[in-house]
Amino acid sequence: MTNFPHSAGTARPYVWAPDQSPAYWNVATYGRVLADGSETDGRSCTFEELCPQGLVAPPHVHDKEEEAFFVLDGDFVFTVGDEEIPAGPGSDILCPSSVRDSTGSRVPDAPPIRQKPPATCSARRHLSSSCKGDQST
């Protein structure tokens, strides 16, 4: 990781090189941390996931944080509340806090970037723990 001179506030600019980013396998999904709450003063965390076809994140609710996705490649279906939203490359999806959501991949090895602002839990903890349905964070 490359750090830059300290700026206003306590968060510092940084760069994770691809070979330096922490990476994890979780429920058949490969994830790589791009930014963690510890680097952003808890303002956001960002990670990349490589999702196999047919993988579904079970319905769950985040009580305190929004969840945002940017699809780099592949074909996904997001369920936000009662609405199913198809999303292909270039799609940006926001799942508001306190709203049930789930995600499913239709295309093999489709890598979205998922961002969870604010980072009330760390990306490392999220990627290294098992996913459970109906969980609240």
Image: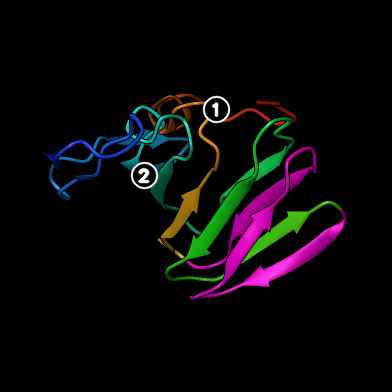
Seen in the image, is 129 located left or right of residue 85? left
- Tell me the number on the disc at residue 65: none
- Residue holding disc 1: 120
Q: x, y percentage for residue 42?
A: 46, 30
Q: Quadrant of the N terminus?
A: top left
Mark 2 is surrounded, within 10 Å at the Cα level, by few (under 14), some (14 to 19) or many (20 or more) other residues, namely: some
What residue is shown at x 58% (from left), y 53% (from top)?
68
What residue is shown at x 15% (from left), y 49% (from top)?
17
Ranked by sequence position, the earlier of labels 1 and 2 is 2
Closest to the observer, 70 or 1 = 1
SS at mark 1 in the image: loop
Q: Are marks 1 and 2 in contact (CB under 8 Å)?
A: no
Q: Quadrant of residue 133?
A: top right
What residue is shown at x 62% (from left), y 56% (from top)?
104
Q: x, y percentage for residue 110?
A: 44, 63
- Residue holding disc 2: 30
Colour pattern of the rendering: rainbow
Seen in the image, is 57 located left or right of residue 28? right
Seen in the image, is 30 located left or right of residue 55? left
Q: Verify whether residue 84 appears in magenta.
A: yes
Residue reaching furthest to the front: 8
For badge 2, the amino acid type reads Tyr
Q: Quadrant of residue 65?
A: top right
Instruction: Give the residues in magenta.
Output: 82-107
Q: x, y percentage for residue 27?
A: 48, 36
Q: CA distance from mark 1 to mark 2?
A: 22 Å
For badge 1, the amino acid type reads Thr
Query: Viewer-nearest of labels 1 and 2?
Result: 1
Q: Quadrant of the C terminus?
A: top right
Closest to the observer, 119 or 105 = 119
